[in-house]
Structures are given as C-alpha cells and as structure tokens.
Image: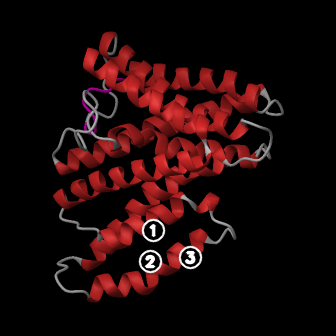
Amino acid sequence: MLRRSLSGLALAALMVAAALAAGPFLLAAAALALLVGLAEFRRLAAALDAVPPRWLMAPLALLWLLRGAIPGGAATEIGLGLALVPGLPLVVLGRGARRPFTDWATALGGAVWLGYGLGFLVLLARVPRGHGVGSALVLLVLGVAVVSDTVAYLVGSTVGRRPFFPSVSPRKTVEGAAAGLAAAMVLVAVGLPLIRPAVSLAAAIGCGLAAGVASQAGDLVESRLKRAAGVKDAGGWIPGHGGLLDRLDSVVLVGPAVYSILRALHAL
C-alpha cells in the first residue's frame, strides 16, 4: 500500500506539473505518455492475435493527439485519409501479416482510443478564454480520474460487498463505483463553476455525472482488454499500479466527455 501511494503521488505530481506548465512541456509529456501507452496496448493486442503496425498506429496517434496544436484544423481528416491510403493497402498487401484486416483495424482503433482520446486534453489546455483556464480544465479532468479511482478503491476495499461487472473486474464493487461517481460529481460541481463561472451548478453536476461515468467506463474497458489478454497489468512502469495504460485508461474517456459537454454549453 505504501509503495502504491508513493508512486501514485509521484505520478500525480508529474501530471500536475505538466498541466500547469502547459505549452511545449505539456505536449511533450502527453506525447511520451502516449507512446508508452501504445507500446503497452500493442502487447495486449498481440496476446489477442492482433499485431497493429507501429509505423501506422504511432504516427496516427501522435497526429490526433496534437491536432489542437496543429494549424488548419484538418488533422483528423488527414489522419483518416492516410490510414486509408496508403495505410490500408500497405498493411493488407504487405508480407507476413496473417490477419491483415485485423491488424489494420487494431492500429486504427488504438490510435483513436489513445491518441484521439488524449488529444482532448490538448484541446482543453489551449482554451483561449482567460489566463490559466486551459490548465485548470486539464487539472479538473485529471482530478476526476484520480479522485474517482481512489475513492472507489478505498470504499470498495473496505465496505464493498456487491460485485460490479465481476466478469470484467472481480474486485470492483457497486459501493465503490457509487462512491467514485459521487466523488467525481462533487469535484466537478465545485470546480467547474470556479473555472467557468458562466456554467450553472446544474450543468456542472451533469458534467460531473458524465465525467464520473466516463472515468469508470474507461477503467472497465481496459480491464476487459487485460482480462481477454490474460494479464493482470498492462505493464510494470509504476510500482503498485502496473503500466502507464493502467493509469491513463480513465483519463482517455474523461477528456472527451468534459470537452464535448463544455462545447455544447458554449463554455469553450
């Protein structure tokens, strides 16, 4: 527990530093985290008999991660175009691929899941409305993932009784999931109006609900992938926590949820 806590605090400190620094440092930190996450994802995919080509998946993921910092706003369309031509023919017609369509689809899926998903943090970080607003929004997204996961773990391990998606993650409980969701809602309900005063309390609570659900959904998605691959952790980078993908799983879906809701509320 001590090792888990210390490594978690160290990772949290790095995440906070990257969010506050913003600019090139945030982009570099996000790109490094993405590449590590992609490597772990590729190992999990290989256990499921899929071999996504690195030369296709990594550039697409990086392009979509940095789309908010690329002038012109066409990074998404360009990436999809490159995935189709020349990506699809090269994978399908290349030598050595036993399941070429599966490999191509897995590369595209990994790039969308991790690259496009984490790219919403870059979009939030570059919000132009007021000094420090972007960094605060990124911290809020990271906070939702960390707080929801921590509260769910503490409550579930102490008073949790009823299983929550036992076929995916046997240790998760309904009590822990409910507590994690409540913690996410409180955090966003308090934090979002402070960052964007124009957002009403009701809207902030709704955003917190969506963010909390997205956080736990992201965790369950990665747990399902690990269970299918027959492994406990995606990697061993973080003592007591597993791989970096084990920490990114919640963030990847919280970013899109918060960004989409704020855009719908015209708060970005």
Q: Earlier in the sequence, mark 3 or mark 1?
A: 1
Q: Earlier in the sequence, mark 1 or mark 2?
A: 1
Q: Main secondary structure of the magenta part?
A: loop
Q: State which region is magenta.
A: 167-173
Q: Within the image, what quadrant is residue 245 found in? A: top left
**What is the C-alpha distance between the residues marked 3 and 1?**
9 Å
Q: Which mark is residue 16?
A: none
Q: Are marks 1 and 2 in contact (CB under 8 Å)?
A: yes
In the rendered structure, are the residues bearing label 3 and label 1 in contact, judged by CB atoms less than 8 Å apart? no
Q: Which mark is residue 60?
A: 1
> In the image shown, does 67 or 88 lie closer to the viewer?
67
Write the residue at 37% across / 82% down: 88
Q: Which residue is mark 2?
A: 83
Badge 3 local density, few (<14 within 10 Å), some, or many (20+)? some
**Dot placed on the residue nearer the N-terminal end, 3 or 2:** 3
Question: Is residue 230 rendered to the left or right of residue 174?
Answer: left
Residue 216 coordinates in the image, percent (x, y): 44, 35
- The answer to whether one can see residue 210 in this image is no
State the mark number for residue 78. Answer: 3
SS for dot 2: helix
Going 45% across and 68% down the picture, which residue do you hit? 60
Residue 169 colored in magenta in the image: yes
Q: Mark 2 is on which residue type? A: Ala
| Image location (x, y in percent) of residue 123 | 64, 51
Name the outermost residue toward the right.
198
Write the residue at 33% across / 66% down: 106
